[in-house]
Image (cartoon, helix red, strand yellow):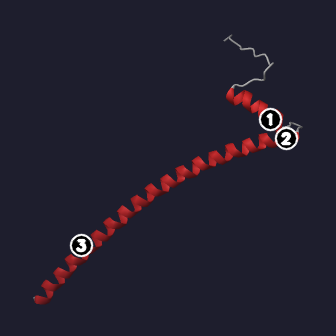
């Protein structure tokens, strides 16, 4: 009889340990899934940045390969990005739709 009671206690303890281990494994899997999703989003963002930078580099190389001087490129950048113009340069604005 005593051996039977001891077997029930150890069986119950084993079940509790197994359930706790399964709960821990499930929690770990969910946590890892979240980390993987976050890392994948970061990889996608960085891939887009790499693509944009490669396009910028290709444009710069094409500009210098076709005889564009550094001075002309700086003037174009100042004109396009900052809205600056040369001293005697006339600017026409398109106000039509």
Q: Residue at x 21, y 79 (%)?
A: 11
Q: Is residue 87 left or right of residue 95?
A: right
Mark 2 or 1, closer to the camera: 1
Looking at the image, which residue sits at the far right?
A: 67
Q: Residue at x 24, y 72 (%)?
A: 16
- Marks 2 and 1: CB-CB under 8 Å? yes
- What element does badge 2 sit on? helix
Sequence-wise, the earlier of marks 1 and 3 is: 3
For label 2, the residue is 64
Rate crowding at label 2 as few (under 14), some (14 to 19) or many (20 or more) other CA atoms within 10 Å.
Answer: few
Sequence-wise, the earlier of marks 3 and 2 is: 3
For label 3, the residue is 16
Residue 12: where, in percent of width, then height? Answer: 20, 76
> Based on the displayed image, in which of its 4 quarters is residue 14 positioned?
bottom left
Sequence-wise, the earlier of marks 2 and 1 is: 2
Q: Residue at x 85, y 41 (%)?
A: 64
- What element does badge 1 sit on? helix
Q: Is residue 61 left or right of residue 93?
A: right
Q: Nearer the viewer, residue 42 or 20?
A: 42
Residue 68: where, in percent of width, then height? Answer: 86, 36
Q: Nearer the viewer, residue 47 or 56?
A: 56
Q: Is residue 22 left or right of residue 70?
A: left
- Mark carried by residue 73: 1
Q: Where is the N terminus found, in terms of image quarters?
A: bottom left
Gap in angstroms between the C-alphas marked 2 and 1: 9 Å
Residue 26: where, in percent of width, then height? Answer: 36, 63
């Amino acid at each position: 009889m005593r051996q039977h009671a001891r077997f029930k206690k150890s069986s119950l303890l084993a079940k509790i340990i197994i359930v706790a281990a399964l709960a821990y494994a499930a929690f770990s899997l969910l946590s890892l899934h979240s980390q993987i999703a976050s890392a994948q989003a970061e990889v996608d963002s960085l891939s887009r940045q790499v693509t944009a930078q490669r396009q910028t580099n290709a444009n710069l190389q094409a500009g210098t390969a076709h005889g564009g001087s550094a001075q002309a490129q700086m003037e174009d950048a100042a004109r396009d990005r900052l809205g600056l113009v040369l001293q005697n340069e006339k600017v026409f604005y398109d106000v039509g739709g």
